[in-house]
Each structure stands twice: as C-alpha cells, then as structure tokens.
Image: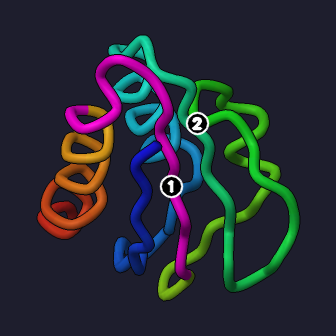
Amino acid sequence: MKETTLTVKHKVGLHARPAAKFVKAAKQFDSDIQISNITRGGDRVSAKSLVSLVKIAVACGHQVHITADGSDEDQAIDALTEFIVNTMEEQP
C-alpha cells in the first residue's frame, strides 16, 4: 500500500468540477484508492466515487490523505499527487 498526505490549494477545493476530474483520474487505475479529509476528520471514501468525494467536503487549505492498494499503486499515487499539486494549482 502506498499513501500520501497533501494540502489542497485550489480555491474551491475538491468540489464540483475539480472533484469530477480527480475521480476521472482515479478511475484510470486498477488499485483500490481511498481518500480522507484529515482537516474535517471522518472516514476514508473511495476516490472513484464523485458522490463520496463531494461528501467529505474538501475545501481550500484542507489536508487530504490518499491511499492506493494494488498492482498500479505507485502510479496512482504519483498521478493523483500530480493532479492536486500541479493541475489544481494552475487553475484560477
């Protein structure tokens, strides 16, 4: 299992369009990918479920913990880290 903790800096967090793009990225991998909002507490949810991701209410400045378990876990963590750190940073 691979894991990482990141701070979301996009102004709307992982809400609506950014959340949909994150889920789309997560669905490219076979691994079981979970995400939790450390800042708000609560359970881990599937990173491949838009409804679950929106429910954990990740806002700007919140820390998230992402885990991936499976054959492509390294690639999954790398891609989702890249998405949060770089892709979401570039958007207005």
Q: Label 2's element?
A: loop
Vertical relation: 14 (above or below) 51: below
Going by the picture, which residue comes out furthest to the right? Answer: 42
Viewer-side residue, 74 vs 51: 74
Measured in 3D between alpha carbons, the distance from the residue under mark 2 to the one under mark 1, in whole angstroms, is 8 Å
Task: Give the side of residue 60 with respect to residue 82, left or right.
Answer: right
Q: Circle 1 is placed at which residue position? A: 66
Instruction: Check disc 2: other Cα within 10 Å, few if <14, some if 14-19, many if 20+.
Output: many
Instruction: Check disc 1: other Cα within 10 Å, few if <14, some if 14-19, many if 20+.
Output: many
Residue 27 percent across, percent down from the top left: 44, 17
Q: Amino acid at mark 1?
A: Ile
Picture disc at residue 47: 2
Residue 46 percent across, percent down from the top left: 68, 34
**Is residue 86 shown in magenta?**
no
From the image, which quarter does the C terminus lie in? bottom left
**Is residue 69 shown in magenta?**
yes
Q: Amino acid at mark 2?
A: Ala
Tell whether label 1 touches label 2 (CB within 8 Å). yes
